[in-house]
Amino acid sequence: MPIETWFPLAIYYEDLPDAIEHRSQLIDAVLKLEQSGGDARNYPEMAWTGDLHGVEQIHLDPNFHWIVEQVETHVATYLQELGVDLSQVELYIQRAWPIVSRSAQEVGAHCHNTAHVSAVYYIGVPDEAAGDPGSLVFFNDARVNEVSPGLGSENTNIMDAENDLNPLYAAYVPVEGRLVIFPAKQRHAVTMNETEEVRVSVSFDIVLTAKSQAAGVYEFLTPPPTQWKKFKL
Ligand SMILES: [Fe+2]
């Protein structure tokens, strides 16, 4: 009795070989930005995220040159694996920001609605012996096999077996030096850092546009920003 599965979500990851050489310099750079980011704009149980605190352009900061190059390389590979013809698109880092998660902090569920591809790089992760550093959790919102909507919810609790055909989420434990890439529209969260140590990462939002000469040919692709005109308001 074969059962075939279709429509997989593609999550890419790579352990960057020279991560350790950049670790302390990147941690220093992130912690300095956290200090300079102004007043906290979120609840104490939420990790400090640069995008909420005016620190969202690390892609233009020379301190992050190495990881920006890595992101560009691996996002290109990811998109090629997804079947994208890179010769017909331009890719932009739209924003990039650090995240500092201290003890008992987490990041609530969200999507990166203004981007197409997102990436996260783990600069510093608490040692395994320190406890659970919190995982990146991707939610299975599509639930293509949930034959009756709500069947898998905790309020209904009718499902009596968890298996590969009905997962509610996929969790990625952070690994120091690992780059993870995923579709920006994929809803996700980061569970609580249950250690006493700090977890430091950086996130990137990437946008695809048409190439200049191809703009207007592809109806559903955004023209490149060089062809936009800002309102005189
Ligand atoms: Fe996110």
Image (spheres, rainbow, N blue to C red):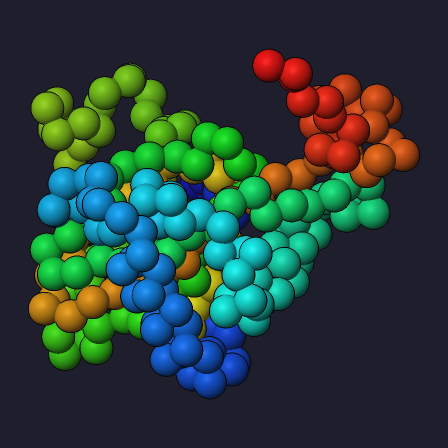
Which residue shows up at 27% across the image and 48% down it? 38
Q: Nearer the viewer, residue 136 or 226?
A: 226
Residue 65: where, in percent of width, then height?
Answer: 57, 67
Which residue shows up at 31% across the image and 56% down it? 36
Residue 6: where, in percent of width, then height?
Answer: 52, 37
Which residue shows up at 84% across the image and 22% down it? 216
Figure quadrant of residue 196:
bottom left
Q: Is residue 201 left or right of residue 109?
A: right
- From where the camera sits, is residue 43 visible? yes
Q: Quadrant of the C terminus?
A: top right
Figure quadrant of residue 20:
bottom left
Residue 40: where, in percent of width, then height?
Answer: 20, 45
Residue 152: where, in percent of width, then height?
Answer: 22, 29
* Residue at the farthest right position: 213
Q: Nearer the viewer, residue 150 or 100?
A: 100
Position of 179 relative to 167 (above/below):
below
